[in-house]
Image (cartoon, rainbow, N blue to C red):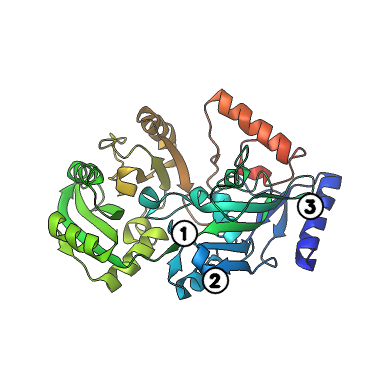
Amino acid sequence: MDAALFQIAERVRAALADHTPLRLRGGGSKDFHALQLQGDLLDTRDWRGIVSYEPSELVVTVRAGTPLAELEAVLAAQGQCLAFEPPHFGAATVGGMVATGWSGPSRASVGAVRDYVLGVEILNGRAELLRFGGQVMKNVAGYDVSRLMAGSWGTLGLITEVSLKVLPVAPGETTLRFDGLSQAEALQRLNQWGGQPLPLNASCWVPDAAGADTGTLYLRLRGARAAVEAACRSLGGVRLDDAATAADWQACREQTLPWFAQRAADHVLWRLSVPQTAPVLALPHGVGAPLIEWQGGLRWVQAPRSQGPALQALAQSMGGSASLFRAESADQISASPIFDVQNPAVQHIQAQLRQAFDPVGIFNPGRTMA
């Protein structure tokens, strides 16, 4: 075992021996999103580097502490990418990317992080080094444990290594702008386009101002050049400069668009995940129009923390969910459970998983209600 990995394993063994909670962290870019941050810090950044990369096979194996930006630079040099566009929010690492399971603007079209995880190596709560999956898509016999780690927030084990499916960068890309559309008009168009053979990749509807019902819809097309050009001709809109819009989509991915920056001091950022076909949401009185991504499936809402129950009930009535994503300020945490599961059967399964992987409960205890 490499010295850096050996030291990490020793930390886990010591924590297991005296039942000391551990707070797993790579770049710390997701620390803002937690019920609370508990335990002794275990930093994974010394365990970094690309283990193997086969561009012709579209697979890369990376150590968990590797900076996400470093991996993306290596892929870009080969004309490849992580198609799901994981946000960085700072100095993100590959392990943190998988543990949080967050995806960017293209998620609705290309899939989520978990869809690209081929295999993982983890240290479980017994300090055992376990490997699941492999480096090909069809290698699963029984439970797909490797993908279970995506979005687990380190509560099932410390990810040490991950194998990911990568994709070539699309040869054609452009962004169309549609001005003066209401929420209802934007959603109607997105639903209509979604049923057509168009190379839709990402969308973003931004309200003109707080409380405004009109806004601007941005639609990104990616795919074969011929398909993108044909879609531009049929969809209309204003075609934007590709170089300029690349920075805008990056800002959308990292939540640095003006809409996010203009949040009131006493408001938190709510993340509402609903079906793409959900209509305009009847938000509580005084709550401004949302920013809408994922062809209607992701709606960001700025509202006081006290509006949480109403927003959660609203999202659930649509078959979705609502969670507090960012607190009022950078020095506060969300103080809201990440896994707010209402179904008793799902709660039971989660408890059994925690018992199997981390029986003493040493990993990231502040990330859940338990």
Does residue 136 appear to the left or right of 132 in the view shown?
left
SS of the residue at dot 1? loop
Q: Residue 364 appears at what percent x and percent y?
A: 67, 47
Does residue 110 appear to the left or right of 177 in the view shown?
right
Foreground disc of the pair 2, 1 = 2
242 is higher (above) or lower (below) than 356: below
Tell me how far mark 3 sits from mark 2, CA to CA.
27 Å
Q: Quadrant of the C terminus?
A: top right
Q: Nearer the viewer, residue 305 or 227?
A: 227
Q: Say what amino acid the circle numbered 3 marks.
A: Val
Q: Say what amino acid the circle numbered 2 marks.
A: Glu
Q: Nearer the viewer, residue 308 or 53?
A: 53
Residue at the (39%, 41%) spot, across then down: 272
Q: Mark 1 and mark 3 in contact (Cβ < 8 Å)?
A: no
SS of the residue at dot 3? helix
Which label belongs to residue 70?
2
Q: How many marks?
A: 3
366 is higher (above) or lower (below) than 347: below
Q: Residue 306 appears at what percent x and percent y?
A: 43, 37
Residue at the (80%, 61%) spot, across then down: 6
Q: Nearer the viewer, residue 317 or 49?
A: 49
Tell me how far mark 2 sits from mark 1, CA to CA.
14 Å
Residue at the (26%, 53%) spot, across then down: 206
Q: Earlier in the sequence, mark 3 or mark 2?
A: 3
Residue 300 at least partly seen: yes
Question: Quarter of the image holding residue 169?
Answer: bottom left
Question: Quarter of the image holding residue 322?
Answer: top left
Q: Which residue is mark 1?
A: 87
Q: Which residue is mark 3?
A: 12
Q: Residue 180 appears at what percent x and percent y?
A: 14, 53
Q: Earlier in the sequence, mark 3 or mark 1?
A: 3
